[in-house]
Image (spheres, grey):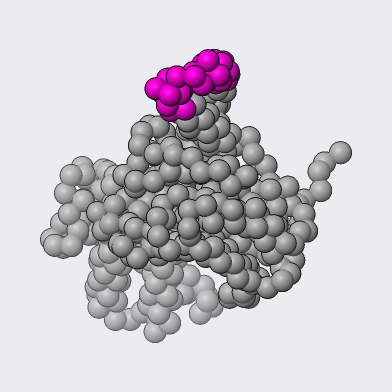
């Protein structure tokens, strides 16, 4: 008999010895795990649940020791990996942490190694190469066991995470649909109400003509006209906000000169500043070519500038526009600064996130805001008084900024005015081609 055949025979004997000692190995393994203070989950398992796939793992290990050719060895190795993966999955299902499973493999490695050492001591005549072969096989057994258990954990965690993501996406889509439906209902109601306001407006005009000869009735008629105008403005803002929240607004990207658009709009407001004895300064380059939606950008500017005038009793308003580069991104800034009262520390406008959140809540509730002012909407320079519109105006600005991928910043000091800064991208990625 050749030396190779002798080694195979000895390894077969060793495998049979391990099989005969299986119960002892498993019992010692369980006792050492139970004695490990860092392993507590196993205490609730029966012996069969605790052993789980490990007997099959040991079967495969013993078949590897006895294998007479590479094919038998590979088959045993694959069986060993499969059983180890099943063991990892079972441990996860029993509530084990991954670290606990790995520590259990360490205890199993220890007791099999003890059995190998005891066998070597009991058989001093063994060929010197036999036990190193067995120990290498054991190291591979436990290494693969740990890897396969960890892989099982990872796969299950990924599956669970993917399921949670799908559930969250479904819930988010459902909420978005509800929000769009709510906003659409709100828009339709405001639109219908605005029609009714038109009837009241016409009636107030008739009353105004009839009241021209009576100074007392004339004053009441003017008050009614102002109230109707304020209500019409409020409803228009509500419709604008509802359209934005319902996702009915789309941005139309094109090249335009932001400086020219802003300069023309600001010139139309100079009579308003003069009428209220306020200064009105503009500053920025003569030309500022950008990409964007010029109409929606102007709506942002209009809300901020007219609101700045409405809260400013003394001093004035300054508007600036400029280009800048930040972290490699080309941007441009619109800044609106007023000398109004600013926001108190307890006001919902400090910091900015709370201001915009509260503004949205105000718009939803359609109640007067805590900032005493009016939002003006007459582009011809007329001033109106409609307390409580700031929440809706800020909400419209916030939604438009989200639509235009712009960010909004606020700096405010009580008694010393406020500065709103809008940061627009100077260019937008090309839209993907539509499928035919």
Q: Residue at x 35, y 41 (%)?
A: 369
Q: Position of residue 130 (x, y in %)?
A: 41, 77
Residue 362 vertical placement versus 321 (above, below): above
Relative depth, front residue between 34 and 353: 353
Of 202 and 52, which appears nearest the observer?
202
* Residue that sits furthest to the right in the current view: 436
Left or right: 256 in relation to 77: right
Asked whether residue 218 is drawn in magenta, I would say yes
Please indicate whether residue 13 sits to the left or right of residue 375 in the image.
left
Q: Which residues are magenta?
A: 198-223
As drawn, 84 above or below 242: below
User: Residue farthest to the bottom?
Assistant: 128
Q: Position of residue 58 (x, y in %)?
A: 37, 57
Q: Is residue 292 left or right of residue 55?
A: right
Q: Is residue 62 visible from the viewing direction of this image?
A: no
| Count of marks overlaid on the render | 0
The residue under the point 47% across, 27% down is: 222
Task: Please identify the dominant SS of the magenta region.
Answer: helix
Q: Position of residue 53 (x, y in %)?
A: 36, 49
Q: At 38% across and 75% down in the image, what residue appears? A: 135
The reply to whether residue 122 is in sight is yes
Q: Nearer the viewer, residue 133 or 85?
A: 85
Residue lying at 52% horizontally and 33% vertically, measured from the top left? 233
Residue 282 location, x and y as percent? 59, 67
Whether the magenta-drawn stretch holds residue 216 is answered as yes
The quarter of the picture where residue 129 lies is bottom left
Q: Quadrant of the C terminus?
A: top right
């Amino acid at each position: 008999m050749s030396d190779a055949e002798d080694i195979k025979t000895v390894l077969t004997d060793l495998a049979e010895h391990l099989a005969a000692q299986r119960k002892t190995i498993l019992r010692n393994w369980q006792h050492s795990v139970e004695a490990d203070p860092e392993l507590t989950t196993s205490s609730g398992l029966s012996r069969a649940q605790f052993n789980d796939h490990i007997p099959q793992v040991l079967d495969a290990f013993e078949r590897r020791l006895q294998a007479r050719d590479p094919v038998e060895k590979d088959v045993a190795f694959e069986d060993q990996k499969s059983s180890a993966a099943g063991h990892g999955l079972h441990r996860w299902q029993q509530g084990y942490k991954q670290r606990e499973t790995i520590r259990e493999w360490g205890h199993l490695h220890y007791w099999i190694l003890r059995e190998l050492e005891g066998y070597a001591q009991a058989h001093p005549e063994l060929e010197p190469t036999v036990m190193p072969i067995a120990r290498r096989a054991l190291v591979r057994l436990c290494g693969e066991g740990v890897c396969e258990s960890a892989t099982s954990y990872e796969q299950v965690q990924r599956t669970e995470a993917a399921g949670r993501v799908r559930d969250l996406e479904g819930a988010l889509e459902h909420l978005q649909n509800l929000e769009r439906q709510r906003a659409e209902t709100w828009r339709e109601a405001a639109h219908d109400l605005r029609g009714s306001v038109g009837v009241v407006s016409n009636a107030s005009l008739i009353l105004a003509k009839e009241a021209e000869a009576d100074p007392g009735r004339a004053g009441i008629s003017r008050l009614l006209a102002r109230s109707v105008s304020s209500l019409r403005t409020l409803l228009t803002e509500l419709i604008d906000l509802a359209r934005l929240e319902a996702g009915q607004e789309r941005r139309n990207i094109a090249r335009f000169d932001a400086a020219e658009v802003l300069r023309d709009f600001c010139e139309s407001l100079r009579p308003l500043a003069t009428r209220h004895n306020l200064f009105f300064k503009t500053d920025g380059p003569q030309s500022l070519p950008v990409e964007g939606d010029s109409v929606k950008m102007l709506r942002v500017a209009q809300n901020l500038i007219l609101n700045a005038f409405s809260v400013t009793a003394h001093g004035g308003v300054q508007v600036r526009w400029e280009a800048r580069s930040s972290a490699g991104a080309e941007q441009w800034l619109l800044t609106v600064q007023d000398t109004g009262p600013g926001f108190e520390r307890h006001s919902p406008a400090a910091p900015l996130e709370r201001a915009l959140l509260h503004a949205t809540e105000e718009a939803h509730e359609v109640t007067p805001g805590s900032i005493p002012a009016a939002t003006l909407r007459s582009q011809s320079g007329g001033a109106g008084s409609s307390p409580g519109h700031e929440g809706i105006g800020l909400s419209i600005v916030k939604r438009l900024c989200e639509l235009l991928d712009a960010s909004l910043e606020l700096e405010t000091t009580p008694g010393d005015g406020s500065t709103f800064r809008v940061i627009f991208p100077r260019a937008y990625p090309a839209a993907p081609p539509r499928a035919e």
